[in-house]
Amino acid sequence: MITSVKEILTKARAGGYAVGAFNTVNLEITQAIISAAAEMRSPVIVQLTEKTMDYAGGRNIFNIIKNTAEFYYPEVPVGIHLDHGKNFEVIQRAVEIGFNSVMYDGSRNNYSDNLSVTKKVVEFCKEKGVAVQGELGNVPYLGEMEMLDIDWNKYMTDPGQAEEFVRETGIDALAVAIGNAHGFAKERSEPDYARLEMISKSVDAPLILHGASDWENGRVREVIKRGISCFNVDTSLRLAFVNNLISRIKNKEDVSFDIRKLLNGAREAVKEQVKNKIKIFGSDGKI
Ligand code: G3H
Ligand code: 13P
Ligand code: ZN
């Protein structure tokens, strides 16, 4: 059942657990995510980026998610979210298609530009009932910069600024930077737990952690305790999908020209990965 992302996040925050926001690019990954959530009896967020809208067609991929949720797994609360919307146009495109939640990512802009565009996005989305996630601080990507000897202080969310940012913009969720990085990149030796605690105390909105694919149980538990309500997961699903295909092709397992057999194995590998994440995040059994 399509459910508002805001409701999914609010329940997670109140219940002291986190949900996964998993990136999809196609039919198989979408099915893997939602069927894993069904088996685990967990709410779930399925999200995609502008690149995926361009690749698959925004309406195509949106309707694959919607049909899978409504027709095949009506018992699972599924939120559909635009991940990393980088400009106003892509937000408008997603809202027009029917996304119930969007991220405006102004984290590469200076603070006042990030604040003013995020505010405009919220004004546009609020009247349409669409939730908005903003980002403050900067969660780097592998390849975007030199990841060795990185000065993490330059990337961190400032707790005082976070309070002002959430209050001034009216966003529904905030993505934070506490030493996390996208991809399987070298991250800060330990997340800045004290900073996260300060942000949680000063911000009255669910907090989102990007770049969480490679986080082990211990770290995940520590940040949930300190207020993280949602983890974004993309890289580990991509790896599960591609590695499954590569190894089966290499070992000549199930290799035929029946594309369905090939993709089914990859879909199962992604499903296992999603189930593991749901277990670690603690959203299993929360339907
Ligand atoms: O942070 C989000 C994604 O991992 C980036 O994915 O290649 O679809 O833009 P993308
Ligand atoms: P990973 O690269 O760790 O999967 O992070 C994904 C993400 O943050 C998507 O927004
Ligand atoms: Zn991200």
Image: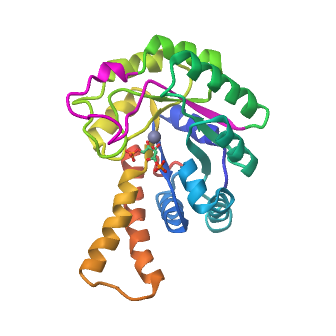
In the image as oriented, which residue stretches furthest toward the right? 127
Q: Is residue 203 above or below residue 88?
A: above
The residue positioned 27% from the left and 38% from the top of the image is 218
Residue 170, how many percent across, how many down?
65, 22
Camera-nearest residue between 103 and 88: 88
In magenta stretch: residue 153: yes
Q: Is residue 16 above or below residue 75?
A: above
* Main SS of residues in magenta: loop
Residue 58 pos. (x, y %): 65, 56
Q: Is residue 116 left or right of residue 25?
A: right
Q: Residue at 47% of width from left, 16% of height from top?
A: 201
In magenta, the rendered stretch is: 130-156
Residue 98 x, y percent position in the rendering = 72, 49
Nearest to the observer: residue 191 or residue 259: 259
Residue 265 located within the stretch drawn in magenta:
no
Residue 280 percent across, percent down from the top left: 36, 47
